[in-house]
Image (spheres, helix red, strand yellow):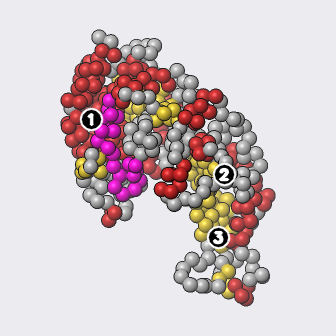
């Protein structure tokens, strides 16, 4: 039988097993796995290895200097593509606990949704991929294409060891042709999305200290330099009121979008009036005429995350502070790199405010896969077969994920196919996932394997 013929049976089997698949996800969600606290990580990793071996994968742990990765592989079809399914088994801390309607690690089903920490980010989504593998093997005895699964235990703390893991275990990943990540929410319209990469990110602090102690502003104002003004003036040289980042060379190498990207961005729906009113936001950031999705995809950003100095309590305190600190991040797009941009920030600070100390924080490179990749059509077919409609094509945009390890270290195209509802509240209290989206995730994962299996 062809993979297409088997797929009909696979999709029927998913429908038959719906309640069992829900119950098994609830059991998985009861296991805490908070990477920031090191809570439940070994137990969860062992559970996944056991589960993947049980369904017929060849699974084991890949140790790093941090938390382990779960690695599994099955090669059933010589000449067919090998897809790497990436996800992460660690979750965010559940605080503040008093804002949860039900305990974060005691999953409940209410209003057609599963409520639990990690259900959307990312346990429910990679577990759907696992069940797609299991269903295929229970029906056909094998997979329609070759599969590697790699599940990380540190994504929620910035993936500090993923590059190390991929580099040191390159021989286990050499035959991978593409990477598919099921993570994140669908479009706010409810339509599924096929994403082609994330922006990168670099964080840093600007620190300055002008004296050994704070001063009385009447006795020392005009005498002691004010560190707040020092940082305000520096920041004003880095970004102007029109929204332009004025660091020399910051935009070097950035090109206008190609025709496919321009078409995809223009096709993405957005209701700006509703969006602004939903968060009580009277206007967009400068420049006012820049299209909404262009802001998230085609332009890097410079954000002041926090400004810390002096007195912020009730009433008045006429103090002249002795030190100030600004926390910042920049979201980067191809072809920018974290190293190059940090060097340019470093040179700018040295030239405009040499008394200010620049401290680098975490970073993640941008990643991009061409929209006209030969895998775009087969992935779109999987959405069409499993969900009855194609997904919106989303050029690289938004937040930052460790996608660069696939496109820049492995050198393969990488795609993100979110299954979670747009209001899943990941990282917040009352994280949730619609039950139907979870089941559709299993269906889509199964259809993806079939679609790739038709390629040679």
Circles 2 and 3, Cβ within 8 Å, touching? The answer is no
Task: Confirm whether the magenta stretch covers residue 437.
Answer: yes
Which residue is label 2 attached to?
288
Residue occupying the point 47% across, 30% down: 179
Task: Confirm whether the magenta stretch covers residue 421.
Answer: no
Q: Residue furthest bottom?
A: 219
Q: Decide which of tag 2 and tag 3 comes sooner along the chain.
A: 2
Residue 340 against residue 267 in the figure, above or below: below
Secondary structure of the residue carrying tag 2 is: loop
- Magenta segment range? 423-445
Residue 34: x and y in percent read 36, 52
Q: Decide which of tag 2 and tag 1 comes sooner along the chain.
A: 1
- Any part of residue 424 in sight: yes
Q: CA distance from mark 2 to mark 3?
A: 31 Å
Which residue is label 3 attached to?
324
Residue occupying the point 61% across, 54% down: 284
């Amino acid at each position: 039988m062809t993979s297409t013929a088997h797929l009909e049976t696979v999709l029927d089997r998913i429908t038959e097993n719906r309640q069992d698949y829900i119950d098994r996800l609830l059991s998985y969600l009861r296991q805490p796995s908070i990477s920031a606290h090191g809570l439940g990580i070994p137990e969860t990793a062992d559970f996944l290895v056991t589960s993947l071996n049980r369904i017929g994968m060849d699974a084991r742990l890949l140790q790093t200097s941090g938390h382990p990765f779960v690695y599994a592989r099955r090669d059933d079809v010589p000449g067919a593509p090998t897809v790497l399914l990436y996800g992460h088994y660690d979750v965010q801390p559940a605080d503040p606990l008093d804002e949860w309607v039900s305990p974060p690690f005691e999953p409940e089903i209410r209003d057609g949704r599963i409520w639990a920490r990690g259900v959307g980010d990312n346990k429910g989504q990679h577990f759907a991929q696992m069940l797609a593998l299991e269903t295929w093997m229970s029906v056909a005895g094998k997979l329609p294409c070759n599969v590697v699964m790699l599940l990380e235990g540190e994504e929620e703390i910035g993936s500090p060891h993923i590059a190390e893991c991929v580099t040191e275990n390159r021989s286990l990943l050499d035959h991978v042709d593409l990477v598919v990540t099921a993570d994140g929410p669908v479009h706010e319209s409810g339509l599924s999305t096929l994403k082609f990469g994330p922006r990168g990110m670099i964080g840093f602090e600007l620190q300055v200290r002008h004296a050994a102690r704070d001063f009385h502003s009447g006795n020392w104002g005009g005498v002691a330099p004010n560190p707040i003004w020092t940082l305000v003036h520096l920041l004003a040289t880095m970004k102007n009121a029109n929204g332009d980042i004025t660091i020399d060379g910051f935009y070097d190498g950035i090109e206008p979008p190609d025709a496919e990207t321009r078409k995809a961005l223009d096709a993405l729906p957005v209701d700006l009036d509703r969006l602004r009113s939903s968060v009580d936001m009277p206007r967009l950031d400068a420049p006012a005429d820049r299209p909404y999705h262009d802001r998230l995809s085609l332009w890097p950003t410079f954000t002041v995350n926090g400004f810390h100095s002096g007195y912020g309590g009730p009433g008045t305190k006429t103090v002249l502070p002795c030190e100030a600190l600004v926390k910042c991040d920049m979201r980067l797009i191809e072809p920018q790199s974290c190293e190059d941009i940090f060097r340019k920030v470093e040179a700018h600070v040295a030239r405009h405010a040499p008394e200010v100390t620049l401290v680098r924080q975490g970073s993640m490179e941008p990643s991009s896969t061409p929209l006209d990749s030969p895998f775009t059509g087969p992935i779109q077919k999987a959405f069409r077969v499993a969900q009855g409609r194609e997904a919106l094509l989303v050029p690289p945009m938004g937040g930052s994920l460790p996608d660069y390890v696939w496109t820049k270290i492995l050198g393969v195209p990488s795609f993100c196919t979110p299954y979670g509802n747009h209001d899943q509240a990941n990282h917040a209290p009352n994280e949730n996932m619609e039950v139907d989206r979870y089941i559709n995730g299993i269906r889509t994962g199964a259809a993806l394997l079939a679609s790739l299996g038709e390629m040679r």
